[in-house]
């Protein structure tokens, strides 16, 4: 048991999907996994373990933002020895050719979070996806016929930020904004684990197009299938 996860050591699989929304965790477990048990209800941050194509997989809600996901991934790696961590999140697009409901594989994550500068005494660390997971996810997405986007995302500390310079970030090739990937990749590197973020575009920051809150909670099935395929290969 850890402070925020009320599970026994072997209750959690070595591969864990990480949605920000705990109700998305419930949806994934109920829709995609067999033989499911719920191992965590602390703070309603639901965690489930089941099987996908015969392989044990867990899914754990992380909450929103770097501080919250950092708590869960630290505990998953240190108390439960989790090896593969795949975020399944939503993001807001800032490029014209990235559309709502597109799936993005985050190769790296720029950030305005202070977490890495505090960790590395002011030096800029480049948080990077695990290549094996990225390749497996890419191959499975292509096999499914998806028009995947692969590249740099921006992990923002503030969802509402009047000073955010989306144009500049877009000019430098950032595809979309979300709030957790830089922390996931940095902590996975620290503990020598494998991490990837698979993101669905839930809204377009340039056009204002959005998905419903129900869609954000559920129905991003392409992203979930890509993440699960990568996790069992
Ligand atoms: O849908 P999730 O996984 O929570 O991801 C995105 O949605 C939240 C903001 O609405 C942030 O956590 C952001 O990263
Ligand atoms: O963090 C996020 C997630 C979705 N859309 C945004 O604009 N930001």
Image (cartoon, grey):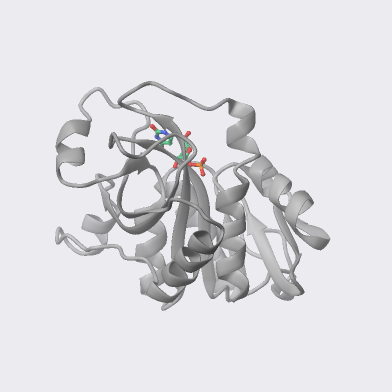
Q: Is residue 104 visible?
A: yes
Among the 4 quarters of the image, the one containing residue 59: bottom right
Side of 208 where 90 appears, left or right = right
- Image coords of residue 37 (percent x, y): 82, 60
Q: Is residue 165 visible?
A: no
Pick whichever, 204 or 35, lies toward us. 204
- Image coords of residue 85 (percent x, y): 52, 65
Quarter of the image with the N terminus in it: bottom right
Up-down relation of residue 81 to residue 73 (above or below) = below
Among the 4 quarters of the image, the one containing residue 24: top right
* Image point (40%, 36%), residue name: 99
Side of 91 where 182 appears, left or right = left
* Image point (49%, 52%), residue name: 146
* Image point (74%, 70%), residue name: 53
Quarter of the image with the C terminus in it: bottom right
Up-down relation of residue 212 to residue 68 (above or below) = above
Side of 141 where 96 appears, left or right = left
Pick whichever, 70 or 87, lies toward us. 87
- Image coords of residue 70 (percent x, y): 45, 55
């Amino acid at each position: 048991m850890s402070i925020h996860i009320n599970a026994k050591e072997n209750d959690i699989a070595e591969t864990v999907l990480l949605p920000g929304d705990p109700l998305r965790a419930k949806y994934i477990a109920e829709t995609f996994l067999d033989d499911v048990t719920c191992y965590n209800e602390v703070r309603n941050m639901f965690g489930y373990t089941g099987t996908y194509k015969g392989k044990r997989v867990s899914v754990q809600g992380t909450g929103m933002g770097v501080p919250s996901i950092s708590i869960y991934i630290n505990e998953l790696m240190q108390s439960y020895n989790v090896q593969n961590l795949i975020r399944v999140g939503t993001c807001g697009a800032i490029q014209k050719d990235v559309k709502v409901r597109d799936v993005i594989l985050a190769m790296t994550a720029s950030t305005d979070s202070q977490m890495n500068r505090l960790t590395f005494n002011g030096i800029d660390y480049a948080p990077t996806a695990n290549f094996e997971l990225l390749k497996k996810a890419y191959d499975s997405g292509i096999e499914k016929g998806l028009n995947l986007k692969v590249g740099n995302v921006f992990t923002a500390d503030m969802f509402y930020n009047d000073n955010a310079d989306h144009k500049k970030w877009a000019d430098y090739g950032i595809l979309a904004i979300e709030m957790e990937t830089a922390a996931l990749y940095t902590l996975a590197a620290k503990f020598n684990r494998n991490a990837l973020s698979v993101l669905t575009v839930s809204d377009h920051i340039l056009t204002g197009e959005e998905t419903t809150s129900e869609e954000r909670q559920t129905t991003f099935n392409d992203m979930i299938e890509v993440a699960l395929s990568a996790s069992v290969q």
